[in-house]
Amino acid sequence: MWNSLGQDDAIQMFSLAKTENRLAHSYLFFGPDRVGKATLAEDFARLLFCEDEISPCGDCLPCKRVTSKTHTDINWIEVGGERDVGFSKSKSKSKSIGIDRIRELRTAINIKPFEGSQRLVVILGSEDMTLEASNALLKVLEEPPENVFFLLLTSNLSMILPTIISRCQLVKIKKVSDEFIKRYMIEKYQFEDSYALDIARLASGKIGMAIFIADNPDYLESRLEIFSRIHKLLNSGLEERFDYSERLAMDFSRDPEKVHNELRMWEIWWRDFMLVQFHSSDKASSTSNVEDFLELANFVEIDDVINILKTIGRSIKLLQSNVNPRLVFDQLVLQTPVIRKK
């Protein structure tokens, strides 16, 4: 039983490779956040350890232990994840995956498996590895221990060392169509057609994002609040803009994911604005802002919209590269268009 949705090519590839006993030792899953990388990694783990003839069955003990993340032959590594310290475990407080984690991993994978004959290493957010950690992992990938498999997951392939990429088989985790997501929302959650379509458009092809929105109704409310802040900022002076930048920087220090989500909302808002300007409102994430956009179109030039979209994308990349957040947000609010009469 595969839980991945819309990844038929990858599922077929892994199933055939397992049947023919030719699974690669290292795979690198890449694709946007919430597109389904972690779900496919769990599916791969169940495929690897399943005891049923038709794997992954999802019902045998190894499959259940994979699902609950209690399988002792799997090492899950991520920022803030558990670390082995002697015979106990502790939560890492680091904001990156450092060389110590890879050294611990190197020790762990050379120990004989406890539950089966194979081991699996899953590194979620591989772009969060420090350079030292990446180089240490590279040495492991160059000469992997027998019967040890590696899954590296990333939403930013450009931040992975080319030498690591060359040691892995690349697997692109693809976006799915709005229609695919809409059908799933209707079948799984019994949503009304229009509501399911709104979620599909907002998810932008990322099934994991769609599921997150469906499971968190407050998300849509917070989205409207962010849209309102963007709209207000267009009429604001420098003081209000720098206040907003300061708030973003403070929020980023406490909860980076919250701010990344806010920036994604910026992208959606301005993309919808552009679609309405080009008479393609049917492709917008929601029709609720169309009238506002039509009114704003009288005061905001299309070149300004293109520029702010580029600035938002650049801001996301700079934050991922650990550039000073306050400088990033100051530039963002300064590049935000100012409503002006034509």
Image (spheres, rainbow, N blue to C red):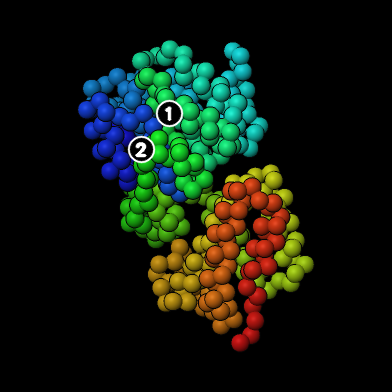
From the viewer's perspective, tell me whether residue 307 is left or right of residue 333.
left
Q: Is residue 250 above or below residue 142?
A: below
Quadrant of the image occupied by residue 79: top right
Give residue 29's position: percent from left, percent from top. 41, 40
- Residue at image x 42%, y 33%? 151
N-terminal of the pair, mark 1 or mark 2, is 1
Name of the residue lying farthest toward the right: 239
Amino acid, disc 1: Glu
From the viewer's perspective, tell me whether residue 325 is left or right of residue 146.
right
Q: Secondary structure at mark 2?
A: strand
Report whether residue 37 is seen.
no
Q: Nearer the viewer, residue 140 or 114?
A: 140
Give residue 83's position: percent from left, percent from top. 59, 24
The quadrant of the picture occupied by the N terminus is top left
The quadrant of the picture occupied by the C terminus is bottom right
Report whether residue 303 is seen.
yes
Give residue 58's position: percent from left, percent from top. 33, 27
- Residue at image x 29%, y 19%? 51
Amino acid, disc 2: Gln
Q: Which mark is residue 169?
A: 2
Q: Secondary structure at mark 1?
A: helix
> Which residue, given by chain and number where applicable, does mark 1 sit on?
142
- Residue at image x 22%, y 28%? 20
Q: Is residue 339 above or below residue 31?
A: below
Q: Residues within 10 Å of mark 2 (few under 14, many from 20)?
A: some
